[in-house]
Amino acid sequence: MNASFPRAEIWFVTGSVDLYGPDSLRQVDEHSAAIVAALNEGGEIPVRIIAKPVVAGRDAIRRIMLDANGADDCIGVITWMHTFSPAKMWIGGLGALRKPMLHLHTQFNQRLPWSEIDMDFMNLNQSAHGDREFAFIESRMRIARTTVVGHWSEPAVQRRIGLWSRAAGGRAEAQRLRVARFGDNMRYVAVTEGDKVEAEMQLGFSVNSYGVSDLTDAVAQVGDADVTGLARRYEEEYEVAAELRAGGERHACLREAARIEIALRWLLEAGDFGAFTDNFEDLGLLRQLPGISAQRLMADGYGFGGEGDWKSAALLRIVKVMTAGMAGGASFMEDYTYDLDPGRGLILGAHMLELCPSIAAATPRCEIAPLSLGQREDPVRLVFNAAAGPAIVANWLDLGNRFRLVLNQVTVVDPPEDLPRLPIARAIWRPTPDLATSAEAWLMAGGPHHTVLSSSATSDLMSMFAAMCDIEYLQIDERTRIDAFANEIRWNSVYYHLSRKI
């Protein structure tokens, strides 16, 4: 499952006015083309930007916005007012637009040619107040947008546009994503439940259940030659325990894990699914809980959620798309237990088996060990420590009247001591601002016990994505204070109550 932007594009729409003659509009068009070429060549923006003809009238503006809505490859629109563009012309177009929008507040020239400035120059280069006129109508119409200010050649400006384009790619992925659930949720668990219809209405992705029998039927159809080939790849790519290697006493378990992976891939590819879930309480005739298969599928870009957690699965896939090509990785995760030593304040994160090797510090080791849950054969899994460095943990929850995305900035650290008796993948992190404050804030927000841990995504990226999806966003970081955080939750509750679309 490719997690990238191979066909995505962003439209660059420049506003002007037909007051100064065709030569002026021609110069505006040339300037826009030069800016787009520089943005595409800058290396900071992973999505191709397309320069559109300058618009200088209400009909042209509305038409280009409708065309953007209908273009499958267009994931967002960048707007810039090169000259003064009377904002009433934009009402119809902005009201029609259904794609994310970035308002770029820039101008063609970086420095003013002081000794050469005349009224022709002033009439042409009016972005300083043209964008203010445009921003008024955006605000008057309550148009959701990201505003980026600065010269288009500056790396910081291009990086921010690149971040926004990644968020727009995430929203586009959410609109098309299909999540397959093999079995239902873990019984009696609350936070992994939710309104799948509302999720599709607001976020776009569809979630549907498939019987575990569909998976076991596919497992039965996998040929031995395919299993042998994948088992050999395991031995080539990982440090495989001797008992699991060809000729080892438990090699049959490795082959069964490979058989499950092949069957899962068949089903996910056939259904064009980008994410999936399983549930240890609903394994049917599966001989072992999918462990290494879920891990390897995540590494290839699929979203995954254990225990039927479709919201985690969807968010993981979206994060993988948004961070395609960036350093680091992203994984399904669970806050498992704390180190409450006053000098440490750490969280040990893991799951039963399923962490993505994209976050691994070194080549994973392929092992087998008992698992008390599931009542099946011992499952094969990849064991590793997560790479140290800055990261985020995040997930969204269904509050009934809205979705809320909660994020905590963290620092992944090396294990303070060895973990010789813990045969699973794990991550240890220090939350900001500290363990007590972050945990209290997370609990106040109702944050889920499952999360997505990412060493590539940033809080800026996630907040942009949340804004594009019109969902509540709460961030826990070094500035978090509990009284202010509690007030933010209260104010958000009022806002979302008053802004509900009935």
Image (tube, grey):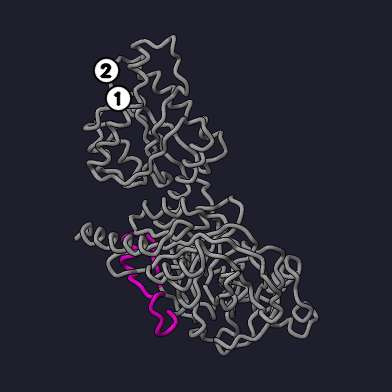
Magenta includes 425? no
Instruction: Name the mark on residue 162.
Output: none
Q: Position of residue 208 (x, y in %)?
A: 40, 71
Residue at image coords 45%, 22%: 109
For residue 472, above or below residue 212:
above
**Residue drawn at x 61%, y 52% as measured from the top left:** 327
Above or below — where is 176 with respect to 152? below
Structural crowding at the residue carrying mark 1, measured as other residues with C-alpha within 10 Å and reported as few (<14), some (14–19) or many (≥20): many
Residue corresponding to mark 1: 84
Residue 414: image quadrant is: bottom right
Between the C-alphas of marks 2 and 1, the distance is 10 Å
Quadrant for the C terminus in the image: bottom left
Is 198 contained in the magenta span?
yes
Q: Residue furthest left?
A: 502
Q: Nearer the viewer, mark 2 or mark 1?
A: 1
Q: Amino acid at mark 2?
A: Leu
Q: Nearer the viewer, residue 330 or 273?
A: 330
Q: Where residue 252 appears, x then y in whole percent? A: 71, 83
Find residue 334 and report its horizontal and vertical position in percent.
Answer: 52, 72
Q: Which residues are magenta?
A: 185-208
Q: Secondary structure at mark 1?
A: loop
Location of mark 2 (residue): 19
Q: Which amino acid lies under the numbered mark 1 shown in the image of this protein?
A: Phe
Q: Quadrant of the N terminus?
A: bottom right
Contact between labelled residues 1 and 2, with CB atoms less than 8 Å apart: yes
Q: Earlier in the sequence, mark 2 or mark 1?
A: 2
Instruction: Give coordinates of residue 299: x percent, y percent.
Output: 60, 63
Report the side of 470 relative to 223 (left or right).
left
